[in-house]
Image (spheres, rainbow, N blue to C red):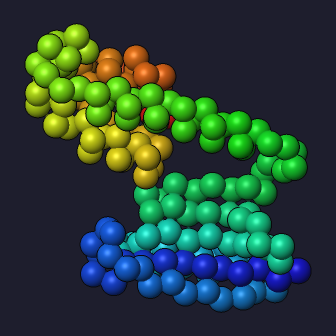
Amino acid sequence: MKYDVKWFRYPHGIEGEEMIANWREFDSFPKALAFLEKRVEIIRSINWAGGHIEDEKGNWIYDITDCGEVIDNRKLEEPHTNSGFINAFKQHKILSSLYHDYISIDTETDLRKRKISFVDYLAIPEIFGEIQRCGTTKCFATSIAEYFKKHGFIVELEPEGVNYDISI
């Protein structure tokens, strides 16, 4: 079986700039995995934009995101179910709920009704973007954590009692 390794990087480390894409073919998964992990090690910086391994059918079987998160699809017990689609749909619904609520905020009354300050309001898009990219982030503002929790995000206070972990 053949495996394609595809990896991407930002030439100047600026997210949003045109990425450089590369690929290489291997005859075994262990060789492909070793190669991809070596790419991560070499590029490990703000230039890394992600990489994955595909099988002959084009299925992504292993992925390393721009945040370094590893998604190993080989471990799926039933790869032909639509559970991934259902989870993606739920995540989209949660993200949409917060987004549409956020863009409907027009006045100070709207901020008070949601129990967030104007400073919190300005920070929400950055936190939202980080969760979209990496699936999780940290926040120390209780009001922001509560706002995300109200929309279905998973919010947990760290053991030190300082930061909140917010994830989808």
Which residue does the image show at 32% across and 36% down from the upper left?
A: 138
60 vs 31, nearest the viewer: 60
Which residue does the image show at 65% across and 79% down from the upper left?
A: 5
Q: Where is residue 151 in the image (x, y as percent from the top left)?
A: 43, 22
Question: Which quarter of the figure has residue 123?
Answer: top left
Q: In this view, does 41 lie above or below 160?
A: below
Residue 59 showing in the rendered view = yes
Question: Which quarter of the figure has residue 42?
Answer: bottom left
Which residue does the image show at 32% across and 68% down from the upper left?
A: 15
Q: Residue furthest top?
A: 113
Q: From the viewer's perspective, tell me whether residue 111 is left or right of residue 100.
A: left
Numbered-mark total: 0
Q: Position of residue 108 (x, y in %)?
A: 11, 19
Q: Where is residue 143 in the image (x, y as percent from the top left)?
A: 23, 19
Q: From the viewer's perspective, tell me whether residue 93 is left or right of residue 19.
A: right
Residue 156 showing in the rendered view = no
Q: Which quadrant: the N terminus?
A: bottom right
Q: In this view, does 58 lie above or below 21?
A: above
Q: From the viewer's perspective, tell me whether residue 68 is left or right of residue 4.
A: left
Q: Where is residue 137 in the image (x, y as percent from the top left)?
A: 36, 40
Which residue does the image show at 71% across and 81% down from the upper left?
A: 4
